[in-house]
Amino acid sequence: MTRLETVAAVAKSVPCPICLNSKLEVNINGERPKSPSDFHAVCSHCHHKMVITQDTKTMEEAWLRLEQSINNQGCPECGDLKLNLEFLCDADSNDCFFLVKCGDNGHYSRINQEGVQFLFQ
């Protein structure tokens, strides 16, 4: 399996950071001579474009943006603004998602296309 095929296979189970739909199309961008090629992904649902990288600084920035967004919304059950964010993948289904835990009351929510949704209603 080529590196592009590997990245494309993994990207199919990762949700889009904008709409959370897991329909990403991956291609390679080798426009810069004498530099490693980047992989680009485009969401088939909302058409958001992103660069797939191993640069942890880029991932940390994306994580911070998502945390800020959910902290502005608060816990859907109690309104608490102290939320802890985790990224989880189910080994059986390859379904990946963001899980949010309320800091004060321990409520668990999942981020989906509608926003932060309380899990145990």
Image: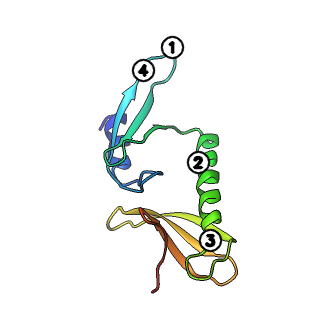
- To which residue does mark 1 refer? 34
Q: Amino acid at mark 2?
A: Ala
- Percent across and percent down for residue 95 are 37, 63
User: Mark 4 falls on what kind of element?
Assistant: loop
Q: Amino acid at mark 1?
A: Lys
User: CA gap, disc 1 to disc 2?
Assistant: 27 Å
Q: Nearer the viewer, residue 33 or 103?
A: 103
Quadrant showing the N terminus: top left
| Residue located beneath label 4 in the image | 30
Which residue is found at the position 43% from the left and 65% from the top? 114
The number of numbered badges drawn on the structure is 4
First in residue order: circle 1 vs circle 2: 1
Mark 2 and mark 4 lie on one chain; the one further toward the N terminus is: 4
Q: Mark 3 = which residue?
A: 74
Residue 2 position by quadrant: top left
Q: Position of residue 22 (x, y in %)?
A: 35, 54
Which circle marks residue 22 in the picture? Answer: none
